Amino acid sequence: MEIIVTILILLMIASAIAALIFKDLINAIIASCIVSLIAAILFYFLQAPDVAMAEAAIGAALVTGIFIIAVKRTKRFEE
Amino acid sequence: MRKLIGILLLLIIALGIALSLKEIPFGITKTIIGDHFINKGIEETGAVNIVTSVVVGYRAFDTLGEITILFTATIGLGALFGIYKKKKVNLEIEPPSLIVFTGTRFLFPILILTGTYIIIHGHLTPGGGFQGGAIIASAFLLMYLGCKGKRINENLSKVVEALGGLTFVALGIVGLITGKDFLFNFLSKGEPAALLSAGIIPIIYIAIGLKVGSELAGIIDNLIEKSK
């Protein structure tokens, strides 16, 4: 159990750093979506299913969608 | 230079958080109120899900404030995009592929059903109005992405949103009329773990779910439909 949590936390940190580094903003949005998704799983492991549900629905689905619309309206690549 | 200042600031914040968290033992309750919620929550509010008994039972007035914050944000966004409403330009989304279109048609009803289930069972199982509303709104986001040309009825969503808010405040005022506090649970608490239990808590959560769902769907609609 602890190994799974450790792997998940490392993945979360890696995708958070990747979201900062990526020049293609769509990739960066997907990376930050992965951060929210793993946060939701960790909330579930910490016995907080209510928060996990909110995090998965808002952080992973809605925010990602709104960011993608915003990128579509502006520029896709960071200079 | 700017990066150096940024890293320095981050280190100071990290040090502050580490110092303030050092004293608190992890996973041990230090407050009495938490124990009270766990031991007496079901008895006092009738909701089996303790989180719901706190959110809509003990601190329902704070939840009304949260709803108001979301409402204000939606109004601000609507005002911002409404200025340019005359020259309406739709966002140019490429027509969805067959896989996305078919997937949307299968997933949309399932997502709506899941959201509704989570809202109605808010006092029994994890979840509630906020989570279910967000799931319903994400179903509409999927519809916008997957079915080109389909739009939500803007006036209907406004009516639903207003009805949700009105129900919440009206239930609170009925509590005042019965001679107790604002948002007093005046209905019978019923049998714990039954669908029709916990008095006004499920009704408030359905109102919150309708309001949050239509507000978030309205935000997506504003972002996609209105011009830059």
Image: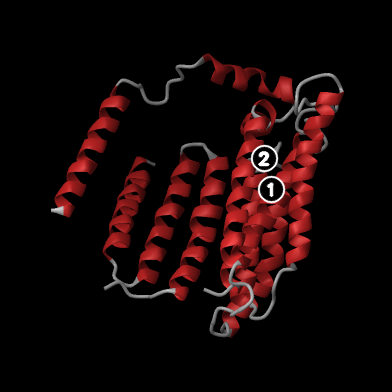
Residue B109 locus on image (x, y percent) = 72, 65
Q: Chain of mark 2?
A: B
Question: Cβ–Cβ below 8 Å for labels 1 and 2?
Answer: yes
Colour mode of the rendering? secondary structure
Instruction: Say whether residue B86 is left or right of residue B207.
Output: left
Q: Earlier in the sequence, mark 1 or mark 2?
A: 1
What residue appears at the point 53 percent right and 14 percent down from the top-left corner? B32
C-alpha distance separating marks 1 and 2: 8 Å
* Mark 2 nearby-residue class (10 Å; few <14, some 14–19, many ≥20): many
- Above-or-below relation of B28 to B91: above
The picture places residue B111, in percent across and down from the top left corner, at 67, 61
Q: At 33% across and 75% down in the image, what residue appears?
A: A77
Q: Which residue is mark 1?
A: B118
Please say whether residue A75 is visible from this viewpoint: yes
Q: Residue furthest top?
A: B32
Q: Please indicate whether residue B192 sits to the left or right of residue B55 in the image.
A: right
Say which element carries label 2. loop
The amino acid pointed to by label 1 is: Ile
Figure quadrant of residue B33: top right
Give the chain letter at badge 1.
Answer: B
The residue under label 2 is: B125
Q: Nearer the viewer, residue B129 or B5?
A: B5
Q: Who's the residue at 69% across and 73% down the image?
A: B151
Q: Give me the residue at 39% from left, 54% from top.
A: A35
